[in-house]
Image (cartoon, rainbow, N blue to C red):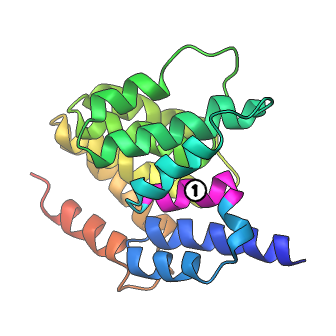
Amino acid sequence: MTEQADSIAVEQAQMEQNFGHPELARATLNHLGKEEESDPDFALARAMLGDVVFARQFLAAHSHDEHPGTAYLYDYKPALEASIAMDQGKPLDAIAILEAPTPYVVRNMQARMLAGNAYLQAGQFQRAAEQYRNILDNPPFNAGLNLAHLGLARSYAKAGDPTKARAEYQAFLAAWKDADSDLPVLQAAKAELAGLR
């Protein structure tokens, strides 16, 4: 049961990060045991918080694995490498890593959102919108679906389409109507919606 509890704690940290509370996410991850450091979900959660040193160490530790596994090779490894690129302010490198041709389409929620965020940061708003729309059309089994509405809203806003942006902001806020009002991501969405022209 310890492994299951640790897995839930990693998911909790991912959600805390997504909700705009990186300090809570770090605290959650810091409470986990050393054995969790070999878990790619743990490594990705750390990487998304900007801990690229840990991400590099994790990649190096697994670089000589004889059988790394399909999910690691085509999902976690590129997501970790893309997180490092994003931390270095290189969204185009992150995009190249995440969009490299592979024999499988295996993208966990964090990696799919990371791709959308990379396109958004690179100023490729149409491609960002396509990424977020793909998430909405092929929903995951977690709260990332609603965050895709926010990413899509931001893509449309940056692309100069306030009508579509407003609709996505409203979809996001409707889904989060019962959320704590002081969540940073919720406050940001409300402010962005209010600032639409």
Quadrant in which the N terminus appears: bottom right
Q: Main secondary structure of the magenta part?
A: helix
Q: Give the residues in magenta.
A: 38-48
Q: Relative to 181, does residue 51 appear above or below in the rendering?
A: above
Q: Which residue is mark 1?
A: 43
Would residue 184 be found to the left or right of residue 132 on screen?
A: left
- In the rendered image, is residue 126 in sight? yes
Residue 29: % across, % down: 57, 75
Depth check: 170 or 147 in front? 147
Give the quarter of the image for residue 96.
Answer: top left
Would residue 10 be found to the left or right of residue 159 on screen?
A: right
Depth check: 3 or 37 in front? 37
Would residue 184 be found to the left or right of residue 7 on screen?
A: left
**Residue at the spot 43% in from the left edge and 36% down from the top edge:** 115
Residue 194: % across, % down: 17, 65
Residue 180: % across, % down: 45, 85
Q: Relative to 26, does residue 174 appear above or below in the rendering?
A: above
**Few, some or many C-alpha atoms within 10 Å of disc 1 (few <14, some 14-19, many ≥20)?**
many
